Image: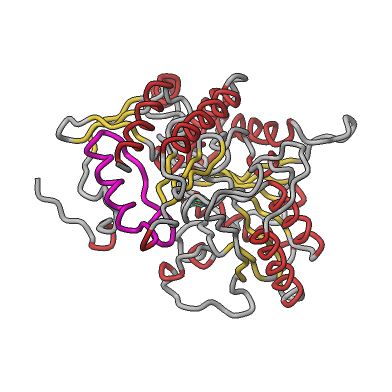
Amino acid sequence: MQHRRPNGTHRNYDPLNGLVFARSQAEFVWDVEGNKYVDMIGGYSACNLGHGHPRLIEAACQQLNKLTWAHGGESLERQTLENALACLWDQDRHRLASEPSKTKVWLTLSGARAIEIAWKIAYANKPGAAVRFDLAYHGRSLATAYLSDTERSGALGPTDPLNAPSTIPFPRHPHGACGPILADGSAHRLCKECLGCLQEARSVFAKKESILSMLFIEPAIGARGYYFAPASFMQQLVELARSYGLTIISDEIQMGLRRTGPMFAGRAQGWEADIVVLGKSLGGGIAPIAAVIADSRWIDSLGPGIESETFAAYPLACRIAIETLEILQDKKLPEEIERKGRAFRNQLRTQLAPEITVDGVGLASCISLENLPLSGIKQAYAIVKSLATQGVLVHLTGPMRNRIALIPSLLISDPSLEDSAKKIIQAFG
Ligand SMILES: Cc1ncc(COP(=O)(O)O)c(C=O)c1O
């Protein structure tokens, strides 16, 4: 079949370029030639429940026969989802019983749009510039490109210097994070690199205090290379940012919804965001949907008519998201994610050479080859390619493309996970 594709949509930098997929089920995908793969990419966390979860398919089919689009987005499905997300966010928050919840939810279509809405909300409360990590990825729309470490996607060139986002460093930890990534109640001393990053953040906040408004945080770095920092680093950074009056926006589009184990990763690290953003797997890997969650004091600062999208909060996506949240709330799931992730990383750590770093939390894992000769760049590319021939899809990532992200379905079976680990170890020779 001849196909004409815009040049810019080709992924010729990706070792998996050229694979064409035909079918998917649970943790597996099949290409058009019938080859079967364990999918350890999972739509970059869009498929936290794997592919074609029967409950999601059933919900989607029922909804297709019921209501697919509603004027102004108003539907029972939308209201139910907004309530479900607000309750979820409120669930474990300390709140006086007499104080009713004021949490509200703004639904939209994509992660980038949700980040833009969170940006507008924070700006409406306090006009000023954003701060982001040097390893940030918050989308590639015309606006979010400037919040991401991918300026070349921002077609407009440099932004107005007063509103241009400032950058603070995220620790790289070439030998793995220096402490627990989720808060475990233990006191932990930060490494020299973490302390240096905090020092740098303090100097950016202090120097630009009069023009800064908000801080965008990913609880762990996703798309820019799957880097992890200890919970105590994140706590201290948030505390510091608050002391300079910054609004805290937690981008949990990739690391929320149980990718790291808990529903909300930032909170599980022991810090509280003013505004939290979910996306990707909220739509069960089937429908595009994202959400901005915050107290009404924030959300209501955007008046009617400021934001709209034809398909925002369309009933089909809402119905799938409601079912997704229900499945994710299975009480046994967090423990299972923790157990599987720990066993998987231990299997890799004990059998890979010591200069290869295996880091992660929950079912977000990463193998770094940066300590190998020539930063392991060629080797990382070759390993990703060879694993595909062995039936395991993994994701080449990082600013130097020498990191391998492993983000399987949260429901992946033990045999699939163990078998993939064995193949990864073999691929390293
Ligand atoms: C952390 C994070 N924020 C925002 C986005 C943008 O989401 P979308 O691609 O749905 O616009 C992504 C996408 O990878 C992401 O990983």
The quarter in which the N terminus is drawn is: top left
Report whether 12 appears left or right of 72. Answer: left
* Tally of numbered discs: 0
Q: Is 399 included in the stretch rendered in magenta?
A: yes
The magenta region covers 375-402
What residue occupies the far front of the structure in this picture?
354
Residue at position x 58%, y 40% in the image: 256
User: x%, y% of residue 300?
Assistant: 72, 51
Front residue of 384/217: it is: 384
The quadrant in which residue 128 appears is bottom right
Side of 8 where 148 appears, left or right: right
Q: Nearer the viewer, residue 225 or 372?
A: 372
Q: Is residue 72 visible to the viewer in this orientation of the structure?
A: no
Residue 51 lies in what quarter of the image? top left
Residue at horizontal 72 percent and vertical 67 percent from the top: 199
Measured as percent of width and height from the top left, residue 368 is found at 44, 50
User: In terms of image quadrants, where is residue 96?
Assistant: top right
Quadrant assignment for the C terminus = top left
Q: Is residue 388 left or right of residue 220?
A: left
Between 415 and 300, the one lying in front of the other is 415
Q: Is residue 280 visible?
A: yes
Please report the residue visible at 60 percent of the width from the left and 64 percent of the height from the top: 169
Relative to 336, 69 lies left or right? left
When the figure is inspected, residue 232 is found, relative to residue 69, above or below; the finding is below
Query: Is 210 included in the stretch rendered in magenta?
Result: no
Name the foreground residue: 206 vs 405.
Answer: 405
Where is residue 27? Give x, y as percent. Answer: 37, 28
Model colouring: secondary structure
Q: Residue at x 37, y 25 (%)?
A: 416
